Image: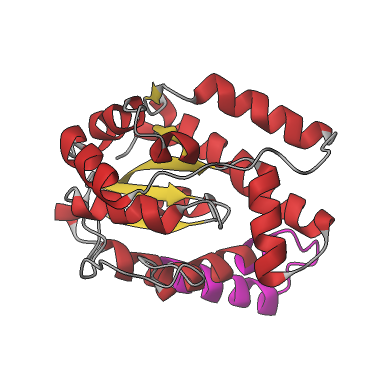
Amino acid sequence: MNKSQTGQKKHFIITPGRAGSTLFCSILAHGGADFGMPLTEAWDRRAGAYEHIQVDQASSHAKRALELKQNSKMSKWVMLKRKYHRRMTKLNLATVLNKADYCKNSDADLVRWARGLGYQPSVLLLYRSFDRYCVSNFLRSGGSYARLMEHYANSIETGILAMKTFGGCVIDFDQVLDPQQTQWARNVAELTGLDADALLNYRNDIVKPTSHEQNTLPLHDPRIQAIEQAIAACVGRVFPPTAQAKRGV
């Protein structure tokens, strides 16, 4: 690790997917956020943009390393495989963070890995209600309700944990779309140093007036209800990093 990078700020946009992250990242990029790739004025709404393949690869290796760690039979071969996956996690993530100050992914655990690389990470947790996320994902890719719920819940819950540990804020995507809402941009500016007015100006240029459908899923899932309560308590606030997270950075 280059000593000059120690303590450099890096910002993670954590999203379960299908939550408006491409539009949000486009607003950030036009406001000065460096994603390590050229600005784009148009993108495929089905595929997204501002994504690094190395971040996805880092996430896959990190999950595999964790699975091997939980293996009760830590043979020499298992230990070597775990070491390999840990090394590949660091290599892929470092490749992105060496050229970009912002990246997005659904795996909030990568924020912890960034801290381990010597960076000072923070979290922009992009929130979209589960019913809209679920319908959008089901139309696009299919899959069971249970699988969609598990991915969404894990992404948001771990995102909240990472945000409260390393610092950050929750961004309600509906507020990004609402021309009357400006506090989200003030929070982003406080956290990242970007200009709030620049973010709002580009938001006003790119977002077209639209009507939102009402919730269509009869949800009575305690886990989702708990997430909604936790998000409501976080929206509008900027969380500082904990003392533990700042040690050694």
Q: Is residue 231 left or right of residue 152?
A: left
Question: Which stretch appears magenta?
Answer: 64-90
On the image, the x and y values in percent for residue 70 come to: 74, 58
Quarter of the image with the C terminus in it: top left
Quarter of the image with the N terminus in it: bottom left
Q: Residue furthest bottom?
A: 77
On the image, the x and y values in percent for residue 230 come to: 62, 25
Q: Is residue 100 left or right of residue 62?
A: left
Say which of 242 and 234 sits in front.
234
| Depicted 105 relative to depicted 40: above or below | above
Q: Is residue 25 magenta?
A: no
On the image, the x and y values in percent for residue 45 come to: 46, 67
Is residue 42 among the parts visible in the rendering?
yes
Say which of 41 and 38 sits in front.
41
Occupied quadrant, residue 136 = bottom right
> Magenta stretch: dominant SS?
helix
Which residue is drawn at the image coordinates 23% and 44% (left, top)?
Answer: 7
Q: Is residue 71 left or right of residue 52?
A: right
Is residue 67 among the parts visible in the rendering?
no
Occupied quadrant, residue 188 = top left
Q: Is residue 71 magenta?
A: yes
Which residue is drawn at the image coordinates 66% and 29% (left, top)?
Answer: 228
On the image, the x and y values in percent for residue 141 come to: 69, 71
Q: Count of labels shown?
A: 0
Color style of the picture: secondary structure
Which residue is drawn at the image coordinates 46% and 71% (left, top)?
Answer: 87
Say which of 170 and 3 sits in front.
170
